[in-house]
Image: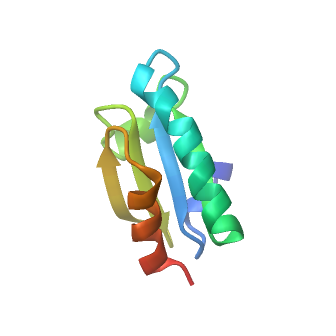
Amino acid sequence: MSNFESHIYGSKPVVVDFFAEWCGPCKLMTPVLQQVKEAAGDRVTVLKMDIDKNPGFTHRYSVQAVPTLIIFKDGQVIWRKSGVVPAHEILQYLNTVMS
């Protein structure tokens, strides 16, 4: 099991940012995800997944546009959204699933 998989199969929600270095809107997600991490603290894990360096995961989760955010819990996709997503929207959803 990869390090990525060990995170997403845990009971703590994991926000995964599927991004590409060449993607302008992806760069806008970095401060947003920092806000999410600061607000949620240890109750959530935030990971970044470069689609060009990890085509297997990109294909497995049908990521066709970047940025795409996927929230996993217990190995299941529980939320996903493509495009730039504001921190309050991510946190609003996370608050419903964080223990």
The one of 15 and 3 positioned closer to us in this rendering: 15
* Residue 82 seen in render: yes
Q: Quadrant of residue 13?
A: bottom right
Quarter of the figure with the C terminus: bottom right
Image position, residue 12 (x, y; %):
60, 72
Left or right: 56 in relation to 64:
right
- Relative to 6, say whether 56 is above or below: above
| Number of callouts | 0
- Residue at screen point 52% across, 19% down: 21
- Relative to 86, say whether 51 is above or below: above
Quarter of the figure with the N terminus: bottom right
Give the colour scheme shown. Answer: rainbow
- Residue at screen point 39% across, 69% down: 93
Image position, residue 54 (x, y; %):
52, 31
* Residue 5 seen in render: no
Q: Quadrant of residue 7?
A: bottom right
Which residue, as the protein is rendered here, is positioned at the far top? 22
- Residue at screen point 43% across, 20% down: 23
Image position, residue 77 (x, y; %):
38, 62
Image position, residue 79 (x, y; %):
35, 62
